[in-house]
Image (cartoon, rainbow, N blue to C red):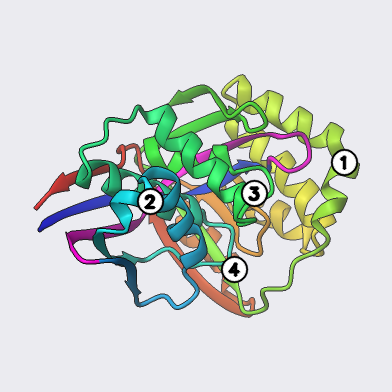
Amino acid sequence: MTQVVAKVYGAVSIVNAIAVGKGSTLGIDTFVETTLTKKEGKGIHITSENKTISSRLINKLIENMIPKKILDNTKLELDFKSNIPTGYGLKSSSAISSAVVLSCAKAFGKTMSDEEILKLGAKTSIQTKVSITGAYDDACACHFGGFNVTDNLKMKLLHRELAPKELQAIIFLPKSRKRGNLRKLKEFKNAFEQSWQLARNSDYWNAAVLNGIATTSILNSEPNLIMRLMEKGALCATISGNGPSIMAIADRKNKSRVQKEFSGLDGKIMISNINNKKAYVHEL
């Protein structure tokens, strides 16, 4: 019997990648932890407190990694622990993908580069329709932490750098999970291209604000909220991914003022630290 544990962190969006196929993300210290047990037998068995976890994605990732002949004679038990809310644009699927690939590679003695791990997750996300673009930007931030700027269509990481660790992400999770029409994002390509170019030049806060104004306008959210959060001292504010969560980055001095702006809204607030740590895996 072999047991391995992989831990992968969460992330938030700086620039949504749907419109132009290029995105930017920032790592935060939410996480997915996967314990994989490999033993004699047959079948893939998944346990998780989160009932919305995509078993389709997990099974396909394993099938894409491990030959059928080996899987037919191996029993895999995967236990997931996570504090990333699913369905809010906070990169849970990308974190799960990396955790599954890392743990399987370790358990089966398979050597994989960071790029191979990320591309396998992104391609399988498209294959299983979990993601439109493969969310390569999300995968990079979950895997590496810090700021990441990517070309999702080419599945290429163009730039990454550490983020100021003294900052915090204040994230609002609306009670209503209703999202706008994602196809409309492509009608505003110029705004997202400009936002991405700002991120490409490491001007992340302005990139996120432009992204926030564009996405809230399109996805039936509240553009005025972005500006109110900025007035309260946020460095940036935007919808994360396709929403419906809205996140603001602030220093500790302005955190409570920014948080208060969310307090009158119908939903929950969570606070996360910035993450610059890379995902890791080890054998028990």
**CB under 8 Å between callouts 1 and 3?**
no
Label ID, residue 230: 3
Image quadrant assignment for residue 280: top left
Q: Which quarter of the image is occupied by the N terminus?
A: bottom left
Q: Earlier in the sequence, mark 1 or mark 3?
A: 1
Local packing at callout 4 (Cα closer than 10 Å; few below 14, some 14-19, many 20+) is many
Secondary structure type for disc 4 = helix
Instruction: Quote the CA–CA distance across marks 1 and 3.
Output: 23 Å
Instruction: Quote the CA–CA distance across marks 4 and 1.
Output: 27 Å
Label ID, residue 38: none
- Of the residues shown, which amino acid type is indicated by label 3? Met
- Of the residues shown, which amino acid type is indicated by label 2? Lys
Instruction: Quote the CA–CA distance across marks 3 and 4.
Output: 12 Å
Label ID, residue 262: 4
Q: Earlier in the sequence, mark 2 or mark 3?
A: 2
Instruction: Quote the CA–CA distance across marks 2 and 3.
Output: 53 Å
Local packing at callout 3 (Cα closer than 10 Å; few below 14, some 14-19, many 20+) is some
Secondary structure type for disc 1 = helix
Secondary structure type for disc 2 = helix
Q: Which residue is mark 2?
A: 68
**CB under 8 Å between callouts 2 and 1?**
no
Q: Earlier in the sequence, mark 2 or mark 1?
A: 2
Image-based side of 53 in relation to 127, left or right: left
Foreground disc of the pair 4, 1: 1
Foreground disc of the pair 2, 3: 2
**Highlighted range, magenta:** 17-41
